[in-house]
Image (cartoon, helix red, strand yellow):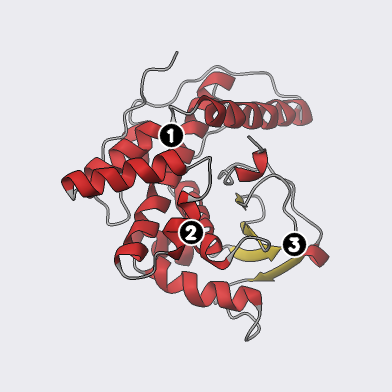
Amino acid sequence: MSLRLILGLCLALCAPLPASAQDCVAPPYSAPSGSALDRLLSRALPVIAGYPSLQRALQAEGPTICLAADIGVAMGYYEPSTNTVMVDAALNADLQVVILAHEIRHVEQFGRGICPHDGLSMREYARATWAIEADAMTITLIVAWALREGGAPGPWQALADLPRYADMTSAFAAGMADHGDLFTASEAAFTLWYENESRRQDYYIASCSAYLDRLDATHALPRYETLRDDFFDQLCVLPDGTPFSCDEPALP
């Protein structure tokens, strides 16, 4: 499976592009009228405003939002060091909306101090990476499902058409059909993220490579801290502030 399908992390795993390759806007997010970025923001910002924690993160952190012609291996990513959200301009408009929502969840995670740090062991760092991505993807599904139920099925279908995430969209839809319960559907989607070995492996390699590169660049000695006991409790909170269960499943 190509890494081109990977959604960006709230970690600095991708290098920023030259300014000439980007169309960017900072708060208050007023892009040139009729531009591709203006069309994205006109659709996505009202959606994000409907989710309190995402809207608070957008307002508090104020990331620059960019569309780029080619951002390498990811459809989108958040770069904390420059406080920039990147979205691939080549994606269809429906997919861009949910990718932006996904990355704003990463902005929120970063703002809440949930992203992993280099004091963790490499294995613990990877565990945190898996969890923050499973959480962000779960929130992305919530946003896309609500759009579908509200008469705009395009973003949901765009996610369902991605082979890498078809399993999660199916599980979430089944949970909503069987129980009509956002908590049950969210918990199922979070757990299912881990069941795709290729998905785990891709993120493990990416996170560990970045981790080792930073240790090398800073000449820091490896440390072996573990995730704090309440990491998952702090991570998995719905945008309205309600917690949902996101226990890490047993892995082979």
C-alpha span from label 3 to label 1: 28 Å
C-alpha span from label 3 to label 2: 18 Å
Number of the label disc, if any, that sits on residue 38 = none
Secondary structure at badge 3 equals loop
Kind of residue sitting beneath label 2: Val
Residue corresponding to mark 2: 98
**Quick one: label 3 or label 1, which is nearer the N terminus?**
3
Give the left or right position of residue 77, taking residue 145 as reference. Answer: right
Along the viewing direction, whichever of 8 and 236 lies nearer the viewer: 8
Along the viewing direction, whichever of 61 and 2 lies nearer the viewer: 2
> Does residue 16 appear anywhere in the picture?
yes
User: Percent position (x, y) of residue 79?
Assistant: 63, 50
**Quick one: label 2 or label 1, which is nearer the N terminus?**
2
Residue corresponding to mark 1: 193
Kind of residue sitting beneath label 1: Trp
Number of the label disc, if any, that sits on residue 69 = 3
User: Percent position (x, y) of residue 20?
Assistant: 82, 66
Name the residue: 51% across, 65% down. 94
How many numbered marks have been drawn onto this rendered protein structure?
A: 3
User: Percent position (x, y) of residue 29?
Assistant: 57, 76
Name the residue: 81% across, 59% down. 18
Name the residue: 50% across, 20% down. 225
